[in-house]
Image: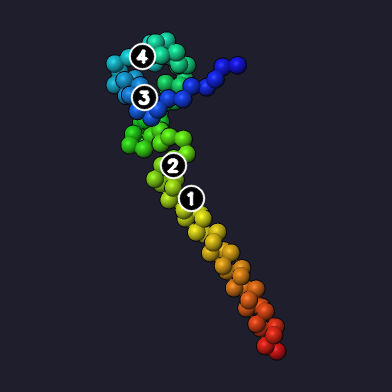
């Protein structure tokens, strides 16, 4: 079974830039590097979309993804707090009578 190779973000950016600049074709790069041509196309497309934050690395997120995750976590906390307050309100209203 073939093990998947991991390439660092700088390598991916460099290959994408070479292809996008027109210095080499995806086919020639794939043959030289032993990559599938679609991998080069995919890296190039990702690089074009967001050159500064492309290929953040394993376990790392792009800044906007990290912010979204943080906001989702905060929303969940606030929803839990609202549920607790609803239950407390119902308890005190019930015991007040």
Give the percent coordinates (x, y) of residue 41. 42, 22
Disc 3/disc 1 C-alpha distance (Å): 28 Å
> Mark 2 to mark 3: distance in Å?
18 Å
* Residue at the spot 46% in from the left edge and 53% down from the top edge: 70
Tell me the element at label 1. helix
Can residue 20 be spotted in the picture? Answer: no
What is the quadrant of the N terminus in the image?
A: top right
How many neighbours does mark 4 have within 10 angstroms: few (below 14), some (14-19), or many (20 or more)? Answer: some
Marks 3 & 4, CB-CB < 8 Å contact: no
Q: Earlier in the sequence, mark 3 or mark 1?
A: 3
Which residue position holds label 4?
25
Tell me if 79 is positioned left or right of 64 in this view: right
Which of the 4 image quarters holds residue 97? bottom right
Furthest residue toward bottom: 97
Question: Tag 1 or tag 4, which sits nearer the N-term?
Answer: 4
Question: Which percent across, then down, holds residue 39?
Answer: 46, 21
Q: Tell us which disc is closer to us: 3 or 1.
A: 3
């Amino acid at each position: 079974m073939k093990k998947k190779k991991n390439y660092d973000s700088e390598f991916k950016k460099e290959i994408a830039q070479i292809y996008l600049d027109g210095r080499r074709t995806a086919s020639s790069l794939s043959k030289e590097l032993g990559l599938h041509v679609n991998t080069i196309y995919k890296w190039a497309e990702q690089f074009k979309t967001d050159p500064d934050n492309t290929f953040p690395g394993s376990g790392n997120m792009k800044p906007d993804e990290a912010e979204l995750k943080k906001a989702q976590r905060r929303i969940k906390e606030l929803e839990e707090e609202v549920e607790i307050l609803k239950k407390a309100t119902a308890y005190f209203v019930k015991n007040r009578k």
